[in-house]
Amino acid sequence: MKYDELLESGRIRKQKVSKAEIRQALERAERDLKTARMIMAVDWDWGFAVTYNAVLQASRAYMFAEGYRPASAEGHKNTFAFMRLAMGKDYEELITYFDRMRNKRNQAIYDVAGLITETEVRGLFSKATEFVKLIHGRLGRKI
């Protein structure tokens, strides 16, 4: 099974998740994109953080639909490790990009104010919007 290594290392756990929880995570992703669009006009760092959260929530929705949850320690990192396997080679570059943005988001929120440029936040927003649509389409009847 493609998730065995993540399960054995304790990075993810198998868990039945309700359709309501899956829908809520996807709805959060869509809400975060709307919020990010407004915030980007005033604060690139926070616009970036909210956009990143949209990607995280869409990823969690997909993970939930597959019957998994990330471990609580390093949850974001484990979510993207899962998504790299779940989405396959065609999306490996995109998931790797989102994982790099995870690190950038941490720096922008916790370490260096003003780190994010307009180009970076707009680039992430564009990719995030397409990703949320992709996940929504893939989940289709599962939710």
Image (spheres, rainbow, N blue to C red):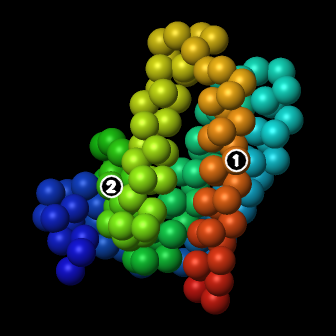
Residue placed most toward the observer, 52 or 60 = 52
Question: Which element carries disc 1, helix, strand or loop?
Answer: helix
Image check: 125 left or right of 91?
Answer: right
Q: Amino acid at mark 2?
A: Ala
**Which residue is painted at 76% across and 21% down in the image?**
43
Q: Nearer the viewer, residue 12 or 50?
A: 50
Q: Marks 1 and 2: CB-CB under 8 Å? A: no
Q: Front-most of 39 and 97?
A: 97
Dot 2 falls on a residue whose secondary structure is helix
Considering every residue shown, the one lying at the far bottom of the view is 141
Q: State the residue position of label 1.
A: 126
Q: Which mark is residue 81?
A: 2
Q: In the figure, 24 relative to 101: above or below?
A: below
Where is residue 135? Give x, y as percent: 60, 69
In the image, residue 22 lies at what x, y percent?
Answer: 58, 71
Quadrant in the picture for the N terminus: bottom left
